[in-house]
Amino acid sequence: MNYGCQSMVKKIDTIMIKRPDAAFVSQENLNATWEKFKYYGCPDYEKVLEEYAEFEKIIKDNVENVYYLPYDERTGLDSIYTHDSLKVTSKGAIYFPMGKELRSKERLATEEFLTANGVPTLGYISAPGKMEGGDVLWIDEKTVAIGRGYRTNDEGIRQFKELTKDFIDEYIVVPMPHGDGEETCLHLMSIISFVDTDKAVVYSKYMPVFFREYLINRGIQLIECNDEEYDYLGTNLLALEPGKCILIEGCPDIQKKIEDAGVIVYTYEGKELSYRGTGGPTCLTCPVCRK
């Protein structure tokens, strides 16, 4: 397996995803567990399969190497969102403990799979450190922004810096707002997604002024998402390559703005697959290698 992914927009060469049958398993399993995982209603399993097939086709049409995480009894519904339990650097994978107790063993299953497929382990974020993949945003290969919130704490950031200090030049710590509360999954990548080297979809209402100004000063065009579409994961996009991305269907305003900026947008219906568990196309994927 090719590895090394210190970019949010370079062309994805290798990706890791997990099919619904390996994460959601069945309607019976969803019925029994969705409330524990704090989903917005119980997903319809048959509809999930339809939505995932549409999403998966976009991935396979655009990514050469697609790997599938298998079912693992240590994981639950949220393991379909493969982005959160790790980051893959040019030196190997860094695994995160996850703030949600029900997800605490996901990294074990993921590490076993990636190690078996040739991706070395660079290290771990250990308690009392906390970190999740959605809080780690590559600005470029030598610059990383990290959201400091309820899912990623100061000790987690310190450990991440120690593991990456030999190949990262700049760390930008971005304080995250309280938002809708401690239990809400609010990551840095909940409010910003790069769709090209110089374009990003943002929800500025939750963005610190210094970070917004930093992006503008770097020449990044900020494409603003409105409140309604932010609530429907309109800022959670996956860049397949510069100028080509995936967005959940149902966000026409931000889709038009992105397309007007010259970016190709693929969409998939994702109410049951993504919205119910607040996991958009970025969350559903773990790019292992971008070139």
Image (cartoon, rainbow, N blue to C red):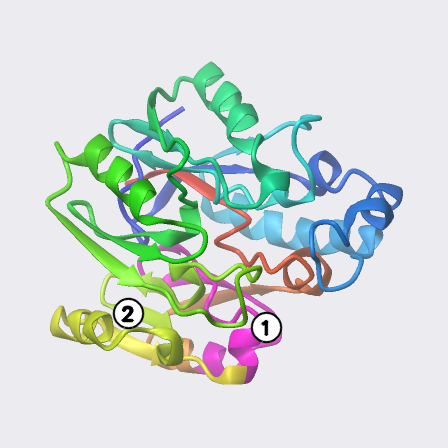
Q: Nearer the viewer, residue 41 or 281?
A: 41
Q: Which mark is residue 199?
A: 2
Can you say whether 64 is above or below 36 in the image?
A: above
Q: Nearer the viewer, residue 91 or 10?
A: 91
> Considering the image in quadrants, where does the C terminus appear?
top left
- Magenta segment boundaries in residue numbering: 228-256
Q: Residue at x 45, y 64 (%)?
A: 190
Residue 230 forms part of the magenta stretch: yes
Q: Residue at x 69, y 43 (%)?
A: 77
Q: Which residue is mark 1?
A: 232
Residue 157 falls in image quadrant: top left
Where is residue 217? Give x, y as percent. Answer: 12, 73
Where is residue 179? Give x, y as percent. Answer: 48, 72
Where is residue 104? Give x, y as percent. Answer: 56, 35
Query: Dot 1, crowdedness within 10 Å: few (<14), some or many (≥20)?
Result: many
Can you say whether 220 is above or below 166 in the image?
A: below
Q: Residue at x 43, y 45 (%)?
A: 132
Q: As drawn, is 168 to the left or to the right of 207?
A: left
Kindly state the secondary structure of the residue where label 1 is placed: loop
Query: Callout 1, which amino acid?
Result: Tyr
Query: Dot 2, crowdedness within 10 Å: few (<14), some or many (≥20)?
Result: many
Q: Residue at x 81, y 47 (%)?
A: 30
Query: Callout 2, which amino acid?
Result: Lys
Residue 16 forms part of the magenta stretch: no
Q: Which mark is residue 177?
A: none
Instruction: Name the mark nearer the viewer: 1 or 2.
Output: 1
Can you say whether 71 is above or below 290 in the image?
A: above
Dot 1 and dot 2 residues touching (CB under 8 Å): no
> Considering the image in quadrants, where does the N terminus appear?
top left
Kindly state the secondary structure of the residue where label 2 is placed: strand
Where is residue 125? Give x, y as percent. Answer: 37, 33
